[in-house]
Amino acid sequence: MHILVTNDDGVQAPGLLALAQEMRKLGKVTIFAPDKNWSASGHVKTMERPLRVKEVFLADGTSAFASDGAPSDCVALPLLGLVEENTDLVVSGINPNANLGHDVTYSGTVTAAMEAVIAGIKGIAVSLDSPEGHKGLLDYSCAASVARRVAEKVIADGLPEGVVMNVNVPYLKENELNGFMITRQGLRVYRDALDERIDPRGKPYFWIGGEAPTGVDEPGTDFGALRAGCVSITPLQLDLTHYKAMDVLKKWNF
């Protein structure tokens, strides 16, 4: 079993190291991640410039590959042959914040796992629902253990074609979890605001800011599961077609 571990927070992120250490219990691990933070990058693939790759060493002394490309590039490069050994599973994370609802379209963590599925490899994205305003180091041990347990099931039982597993873990100790829940995407509530400022040369520039997003606490959703203290496992599909809308649109007269 050869597992590729990646993320969107950068190769030195503590969540990546915690994930890799747990995945090593299941097989050989190759770490291939961005050399900087690509949070909220979405599904980016670099086509207009060359990509650079270098070997780096993580806090536990193990080696990893770092690229100046996006998270999706960090999956595409090894799968296209930069890593000679065939990859059986791609696990992306551990993101320090949850990826819920429409977050999955922004998330480099999730879209890195999508890149694997596009290539015909099973993909899992793992995120931690850390408390807003948390100070100090985050404890990734529970989320890493959950990631291993989910990966074990995927390895043993497989996944339907075209499915990405989006896993979100409450910020709890493992013995405090209220179980695992298979969920649907919930409704994320964004509270973005535009902040316009003036630079020292008198020219305007803009920040997209605002308060942290919230969500609708609805049973059966990813957001609802986290609020109930459960691990949320949402199977996402790459086919975004709205089939009911097709039936309506076919009645249009062009």
Image (tube, rainbow, N blue to C red):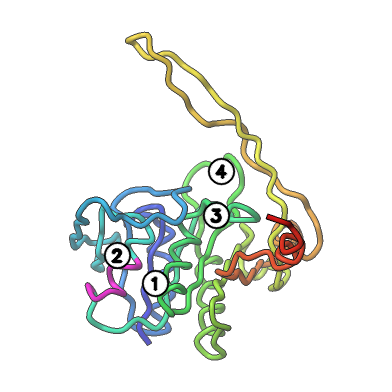
Q: Which mark is residue 60?
A: 2
- For the residues labelled 2 and 3, say whether their Cβ atoms are less than 8 Å apart: no
Against 3, residue 199 (above or below) is above
Closer to the N terminus: mark 4 or mark 3? 3
> Which residue matches tag 1?
21
The percent position of residue 100, horizontal first and vertical second, equals: 63, 56
* Amino acid at the residue labelled 3: Thr
From the image, tell me which residue sits under label 4. Answer: 134
* Occupied quadrant, residue 101: bottom right
Closer to the N terminus: mark 1 or mark 4? Answer: 1
Graded by Cα atoms within 10 Å as few (under 14), some (14 to 19) or many (20 or more), the crowding at tag 2 reads few
Q: How many labels does the image show?
A: 4
Left or right of 111 in this view: 11: left
Residue beneath the point at 72% across and 48% down: 215
> Which residue in the structure is indicated by mark 3?
105
Q: Tell me the distance, in whole angstroms, between the alpha carbons under discs 1 and 4.
A: 24 Å
Give the quadrant of the C terminus. bottom right
Mark 3 nearby-residue class (10 Å; few <14, some 14–19, many ≥20): some
Kind of element beneath mark 1: helix
Secondary-structure class at tag 2: loop
Badges 2 and 1: C-beta atoms under 8 Å apart? Answer: yes
Q: Give the range drawn in magenta.
A: 75-82
Foreground residue, 60 or 96? 96
Tell which circle, 1 or 3, labels the residue nearer the N-terminal end: 1
Which residue appears at 37% of the width and 14% of the height? 199
In the rendered image, the residue lying farthest to the front is 254
For the residues labelled 2 and 1, the Cα–Cα distance comes to 9 Å
